[in-house]
Amino acid sequence: MIKSYQRSSKLFNKGPSLLSKLLLLIFISIVLMGADYRFHYLKNIRQVTNVFTKPFHTLLNLPSDIYNFTTEYFSNQSRLIDENEALKLNIDSLKADLQRLDFIDQENNQLKNLLEVKNAYKFKTEAVSIIYSRFDPFNQKIIIDGGQNKDFQAGQPVINALGLVGQISNVFPETSEVTLIVDKKMSVPIQIQRNGLRAITNGNGQDETILLSYLPNSVDVIIGDVLKTSGIDTIYPEGIAVAEVAEINNNPNLPFAKIICKPISAIRNHTHVLVVTPINKIVNNVAPIKNDQKK
């Protein structure tokens, strides 16, 4: 009797199979989805469910979001750094091009001015470039790109478009040394353009200035007076601008005034100069008149 009861109990306790349950769930899901699609019955339930599940979704996606944000941030930083470096290189290149163009423009203007001066003066000149400059208290010199190969001689004056630069002091096979008028060894006979007063300038050796020497305190010289070559030494042709009076110091205890002048040539800002052919060389190169021409 007991065994018969146990067998009947197991029979009635046995529920539907797992497959049946799965099919039932699928059927219910399809019915609910169809009803929701048709009548929107689950809309409110879904909204409520989204409210409760959204924080969990956010929390679950947080590591991925952090990774994506960090990757994108550093990628953008790297890209910006590369772009910045490229822009800097581009700017440096443009600056270099601008400097080259500015230098070429200045050089063209200097050559144009030299040509105008060359045509304006009656004496013969030859244009050369400056290849080296030396400015210190003991030596105020430049090196030009012409020497024995251009038949240059020591003593030839050198000028630029503004005025007197100096004088050739040494000649080499392909270059020449020019001592500037501001050098202590240099003296130039001049006359003041305003009143024709003649005097001699001497290089100061510093501050790129020259001194107007051995003139009394009462001399008729004013600031702004322009000094030009007098031509009396037959080395420097007459009328070349030399300097402008910048400062006058009169000391009653001294016999002479201290007159400081600023050279007009401004040699530091120039790349080309003109070498002046000596007057005696021009005369010697003139062909002699033949006896039959005299007749």
Image (tube, rainbow, N blue to C red):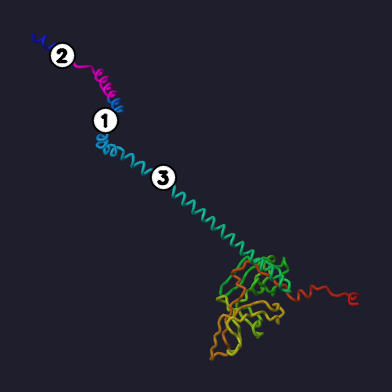
Looking at the image, residue 139 sits to the left or right of residue 9; the answer is right
| Amino acid type shown at disc 2 | Phe
The crowding category of the residue bearing disc 2, from other C-alpha atoms within 10 Å (few below 14, some 14 to 19, many at least 20), is few
Looking at the rendered image, the disc whose residue lies closer to the viewer, 2 or 3, is: 2
Quarter in which the C terminus is drawn: bottom right
| Amino acid type shown at disc 1 | Leu
- Give the image location of residue 212, x and y in percent: 60, 83
Q: Residue placed at 59% from the left, 62% from the top?
A: 103
Which one is earlier in the sequence, the residue at label 2 or at label 1? 2
* Magenta stretch contains residue 21: yes
Question: Disc 1 to disc 3, how far (Cα)?
Answer: 44 Å
In the rendered view, tell whether residue 266 sits above or below residue 12.
below
Question: Disc 2 to disc 1, how far (Cα)?
Answer: 36 Å
- Give the prevailing secondary structure in the magenta stretch: helix
The crowding category of the residue bearing disc 1, from other C-alpha atoms within 10 Å (few below 14, some 14 to 19, many at least 20), is some
**Helix, strand, or loop for circle 3?**
helix
- Give the image location of residue 58, x and y in percent: 29, 39
The crowding category of the residue bearing disc 3, from other C-alpha atoms within 10 Å (few below 14, some 14 to 19, many at least 20), is few
Which disc, if any, is residue 243?
A: none
Looking at the rendered image, the disc whose residue lies closer to the viewer, 2 or 1, is: 1
Find disc 2 in the rendering and name its residue.
Answer: 12
In the rendered view, tell whether residue 23 sits above or below residue 244.
above
**Helix, strand, or loop for circle 2?**
helix
Looking at the image, residue 218 sits to the left or right of residue 61; the answer is right
